[in-house]
Amino acid sequence: MPVITFSRQYASGGSTIARLVAERLGWQLVDNEFLDLVAEQAGLSRKEVEQREERVPGLAERLARALAISSPEVFVATGVPPESRFGTEAELVRATEAVINQAVREEEKLILVGRGAQAYLAEHRDTLHVYVVAPREAQVQAAAERLGVSRKEAEDCIDKTDDGRRRYVKTHYDRDWEDPVNYHLVINTGVFTYEQAAELVVVAARARGWV
């Protein structure tokens, strides 16, 4: 079944674009709910999830620790080492993969955001892998506004988050997260608005014969 994966630099707008694409295509979007699904796989209860947000300030500290490695984009600059009392890194990665497998099996047309989905599904047929990037200054401004922090804190957040994503994909799939060859479509939101970027993805899906 057709699957669109979104990888994105932090504060590039990738999650918003994925949502816009899902709305336009009428496809199932799996983004922040990944937190709940992986939490269940890791043995956590849903009540331990305080808020479905991508950034750590909206997450229970316990969940942030548990998912820091398997989902590094939600572990942002807390200054606390990524520890997990719920299993090894490999176990958490397998839990994430189990959620991806289940979503792919159950949904006819699916959009997955982050969590190494583009690497895990690299050999999967009928996929469109999208990578969303942005100029550094745009990232910093968006992160500072979103988190309500200083420029320095925003820069640290961006670096730590993107470093985590980079390491996650390299460690577990031996792939270069930033290599454009690993994607079918790379979109720079410094050039295109989120709406325009979403339309580019829709056009690509249409070109694949999925729409």
Image (cartoon, rainbow, N blue to C red):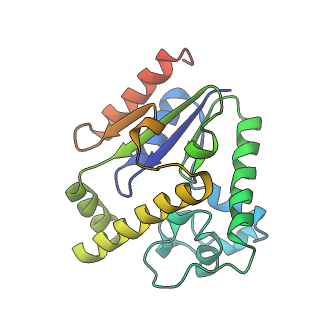
> Does 46 appear above or below 195?
below
**Residue 157 on image: x %, y %:** 36, 71
Visible in this render: residue 148?
no
Instruction: Judge by depth and name the residue closer to the eye, 210 or 53.
Output: 210
Outermost residue to the bottom? 80
Name the residue: 63% across, 74% down: 63
Task: Please tell me in which quadrant of the rendered image residue 88 appears.
Answer: bottom right
In the image, is 83 to the left or to the right of 19? right
Q: Looking at the rendering, which quadrant does residue 180 occupy?
A: top left
| Residue 210 x/y as whole percent | 57, 19
Q: Residue at x 70, y 29 (%)?
A: 108
The mark tally for this picture is: 0
Looking at the image, residue 57 sits to the left or right of residue 69; the answer is left
| Point 71% across, 42% down: residue | 103
- The quarter of the picture where the N terminus appears is top right
**Residue furthest front in the image:** 174
Which residue is pictured at 38% across the width and 53% down the height? 9
**Horizontal and vertical percent position of residue 138:** 23, 55
**The C terminus - image quarter:** top right
Left or right of residue 172, residue 113 in this image: left
Q: Is residue 125 visible?
A: yes
The percent coordinates of residue 20 (x first, y second) are: 44, 38
Rendered position, 119 above or below 158? above
